[in-house]
Amino acid sequence: MSRTGRVERATKETKVVVELDLDGTGVADISTGVGFFDHMLDQLAKHGLFDLTVRTEGDLHIDSHHTMEDTALALGAAFREALGDKAGIRRFADAKVPLDEALAEVTVDVSGRPYLVHSEPEGMAPVIGRDYDTTMTRHIFESFVAQARVALHVHVPYGRNAHHIVECQFKAFARALRFACERDPRVTGVPSTKGAL
């Protein structure tokens, strides 16, 4: 049974198309116009083993905020669609990923209840590359969580380099999400005593 999602989102600020296959091999085709964000979405696909296509046209003449926010909203909605009724999945997962001096710890519950806990070192460089506002990392995860309806805890206990701090978050996020979404042959139905997620 195919576990895929396709979401189109259009506003006066952005046009977004996301296509996702949860049971892919990590193939990515990403174009948002924000170079470092594209790199992070590549990490999500590669380390999550998700096949992911993202096409975003945004109002980058203003700034990159709407482009990244709306892409993350569409991405979350595509994950929710691809997961369907969530029968047979592992549901819970966590991952720790180092990147040189930085470490990210991510825990996810495909719960049906959106909730984000996020912490990272203070005093990071405000921009990575030409146009990735580092304060947007939390907001990207907030936007994803709102639409995917998952509980997500992201913690970076230490790190110095802003590129490393953000990238290890996306890599750990990818790994945790991959394991949480994977099918477990021992699970019958939805993994919840409530009978629904």
Image (cartoon, helix red, strand yellow):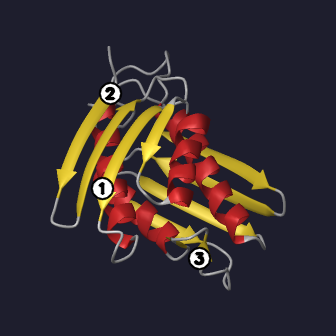
Residue 113 visible in the snapshot = no
Dots 3, 1 in contact, CB < 8 A: no
| Direction front: furthest residue | 61
The answer to whether residue 165 is left or right of residue 178 is right
C-alpha gap between disc 1 and disc 2: 22 Å
Q: Earlier in the sequence, mark 3 or mark 2?
A: 2
Residue at the spot x=37%, y=33% of the render?
Answer: 20
* Label annotation for residue 4: 2
The residue under label 1 is which amino acid type?
Glu
Task: Give the image quarter of residue 162.
Answer: bottom right
Image location (x, y in percent) of residue 145: 37, 57
**Which SS class for mark 2?**
strand
Q: Nearer the viewer, mark 1 or mark 2?
A: 1
Residue at the spot x=29%, y=50% of the render?
Answer: 74
**Which SS class for mark 3?**
strand
Residue at the spot x=60%, y=41% of the render?
Answer: 175
Residue toward you, 188 or 61: 61
C-alpha gap between disc 3 and disc 1: 21 Å
Note whether 89 is above or below 120 in the view shown: above
| Direction bottom: furthest residue | 123
Mark 2 nearby-residue class (10 Å; few <14, some 14–19, many ≥20): many
C-alpha gap between disc 3 and disc 2: 33 Å
The residue under label 2 is which amino acid type?
Thr
Q: Earlier in the sequence, mark 1 or mark 2?
A: 2
Q: Which residue is mark 3?
A: 127
Note whether 21 is above or below 14 in the view shown: above
The residue under label 3 is which amino acid type?
Val
Residue toward you, 71 or 143: 71
